[in-house]
Image: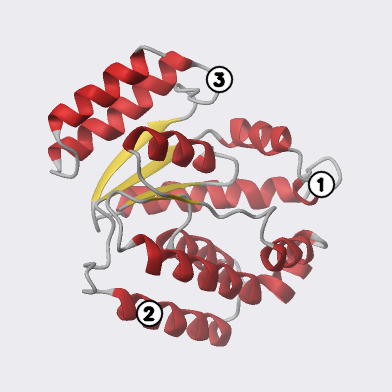
């Protein structure tokens, strides 16, 4: 199982699609626009800055947590499933809301209990609880803002809600801190400021080679299969 993690607008869904296509494995997406429950909760979350984050934050995280758990139960039965959201990323987001007083201690304890129970329910069946590989999309905060604007979701638009800039920077920092302390599995960092895998084929091949060669070293991808994948990709 492969987790793709990074702050808002870092390119998680795009990389998930590219990697899953290369590996011939399943891709699991957060799918904000296609999930009515989460989309509606996010609109409420973004509606009034810190005030709405305090009002809606815990319920939004529980909604995300439930959706991610449903995906996880399917993904653990597959080889090299690629997830652009996970219980790991959910914890990063919930923790930064709690650390900034937008989820209070009592609500955070409920969230933690539910998250831990979900994790326990899938551990050992047949999964050990951690991904085989985590991929961190590192991105400069200003680059991140440009990427968020480019995807065109009105509820995320800093032109209408300039106070969101501080929130996005905070989330970016939370993921930096997460990556610096992450020890649950092998970790590959893809620098989005240097590798534009969305628009550059050369950068795309570099990013995918970085990830797939690590899967080979972990015994999760056969070397001959990797060479075939790479040759096919380079021939496009």
How many angstroms separate mark 3 from mark 1 (CA)? Answer: 23 Å
Give how far across and how far down residue 164 sits, in percent: 73, 50
Residue at x-position 36% and y-position 48%: 179
Residue beneath disc 2: 116
Give how far across and how far down residue 132 sits, in percent: 24, 52
The relative height of residue 226 versus residue 200 in the rendered view (above or below) is: below
For the residues bearing labels 3 and 2, Cβ distance under 8 angstroms: no
Q: Tag 3, which secondary structure? A: loop
How many angstroms separate mark 3 from mark 2 (CA)? Answer: 39 Å
| Quadrant housing the C terminus | top left
- Mark 3 or 1, nearer chain start: 1
Residue beneath disc 1: 154
Instruction: Indicate left or right for 173 with 132 as reference.
Output: right
How many angstroms separate mark 2 from mark 1 (CA)? Answer: 34 Å
For the residues bearing labels 3 and 1, Cβ distance under 8 angstroms: no
The relative height of residue 182 versus residue 59 in the rendered view (above or below) is: above
Asked whether 184 or 33 is in front, the reply is 33
Residue beneath disc 3: 199
For the residues bearing labels 2 and 1, Cβ distance under 8 angstroms: no
Instruction: Indicate left or right for 116 with 184 as reference.
Output: right
Instruction: Indicate left or right for 213 with 28 as reference.
Output: left
Residue 102 appears in the figure: no
Label 2 crowding class (10 Å Cα cut-off): few <14, some 14-19, many 20+?
A: few
């Amino acid at each position: 199982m492969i987790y793709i993690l990074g702050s808002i607008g870092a390119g998680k869904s795009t990389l998930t699609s590219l990697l899953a296509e290369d590996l011939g494995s399943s891709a699991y997406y957060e799918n904000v626009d296609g999930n009515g429950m989460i989309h509606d909760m996010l609109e409420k979350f973004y509606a009034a800055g810190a005030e709405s984050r305090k009002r809606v934050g815990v319920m939004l995280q529980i909604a995300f947590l439930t959706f991610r758990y449903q995906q996880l139960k399917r993904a653990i039965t597959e080889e090299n499933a690629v997830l652009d959201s996970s219980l790991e990323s959910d914890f990063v987001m919930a923790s930064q809301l709690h650390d900034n007083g937008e989820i209070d201690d009592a609500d955070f304890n409920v969230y933690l209990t539910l998250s831990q129970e979900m994790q326990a329910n899938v551990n050992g069946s047949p999964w050990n609880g951690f991904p085989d590989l985590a991929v961190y999309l590192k991105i400069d905060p200003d680059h991140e803002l440009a990427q968020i604007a480019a995807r065109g979701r009105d509820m995320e638009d800093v032109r209408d809600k300039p106070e969101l800039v501080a929130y996005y920077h905070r989330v970016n920092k939370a993921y930096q801190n997460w990556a610096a302390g992450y020890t649950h599995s092998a970790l590959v960092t893809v620098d989005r400021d240097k590798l534009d895998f969305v628009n550059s084929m050369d950068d795309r091949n570099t990013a995918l080679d970085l990830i797939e060669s690590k899967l080979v070293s972990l015994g999760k991808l056969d070397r001959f299969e990797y060479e075939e994948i790479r040759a096919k990709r380079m021939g496009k």
